[in-house]
Image (cartoon, grey):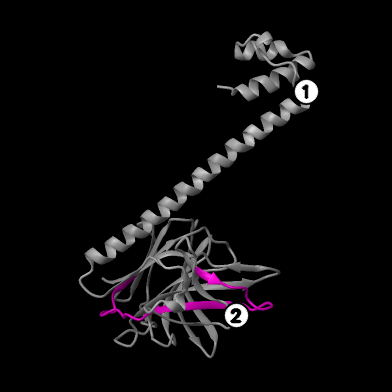
Amino acid sequence: MPTPEFVSGAGSTLRDLGLGHVLEAVTGVPMDALGSDIAPAAGLQAWSANLENQTATANAGVATVSDVATANSAAIAHLTATTTSTGATVSDQFASAGALSGYSNWNLGGSSLGAGVQLSVNPAGSCGIGGSPTGTSTGALYALSTTAMTTDNHTVTLVCAATGNIAAYTSAILRAAPDMSSFVYLNVFQNVAQLGRGSFTGGAWTFTLWKFATLSQAQAQTIAVKASGTTYTVSVGGAELMTYTDSAGTAATGTGHRSVGFAVQAEWSFAYSYGWPLASFTAVDS
């Protein structure tokens, strides 16, 4: 149903153009009931402003719905982790804004990206890279939980706080050595997920790709990677995305390789791109 502003503004404009009868036929409103003291340009401007206001309201509603969906996904991941695991459990919904170094449950490290560049939690409760990298520095920052898993078989789950991009990744890390000299990773870009084993030594990241799969990463998605024996299964929203069996046992296991965590990349290519922020992190023995 046309709004009064639309009818009045459009009626005045069409009257001046000699086409008022068209509006009368469409709306069923007599032309005498339509304002005639509004200039054509003013009528169109009022109509445009009305549409812009409606669009802004609609967009605000969509953002609110997305934020609610993200919060729900994070809460579900937390409840699933804390109620179903019979072994070690790690769960963080990043409730306190500020540098992640202020949290006592994470050990931090990674590339040197410049003074003040660190993993941080914003007031909305999402964790990503905060600060401005120096020059054209490229690399990633990681966080390992201070709680290690008690078995080699465990699952790491990340909830996306925003849609990322195709140039930078956010990683789920599992079966890691406490010093990150070896680990299994799932690097998730906006359009592809890469599964493999890696290391971070001497300030350099090394990734050995096992398998990849395309996806459409988005806000509120739940992305998980599960290690069971030599088989790794990646799922998005509970649906399997890919599976890989490390038949040769190239990924280290045992008591010294049960740390879990995540990493976020900053990638320079004429401008900086960042991996998507996390709404929550969970890890459980499985």
Q: Position of residue 196 (x, y in %)?
A: 45, 75
Examine the image and state in which quarter residue 73 appears.
bottom left
Residue 226 can be seen in this image: no
**Depth order, front residue of 180/191:** 180
Dot 1 surroundings within 10 Å: few (below 14), some, or many (20 or more)?
A: some
Q: Earlier in the sequence, mark 2 or mark 1?
A: 1
Residue holding disc 2: 113
Identify the residue at image location x=46%, y=64%.
126
Identify the residue at image location x=42%, y=85%.
182
Secondary structure found at label 2: loop
Q: Based on the picture, tell me whether residue 199 belongs to the magenta stretch.
A: no
Which label number is shown at residue 139? none
The quarter of the picture where the C terminus appears is bottom left
Identify the residue at image location x=68%, y=33%.
48
Q: Magenta residues?
A: 128-155
Q: Residue furthest front?
A: 37
Residue holding disc 1: 39
**Depth order, front residue of 112/58:** 58
Q: Nearer the viewer, mark 2 or mark 1?
A: 1
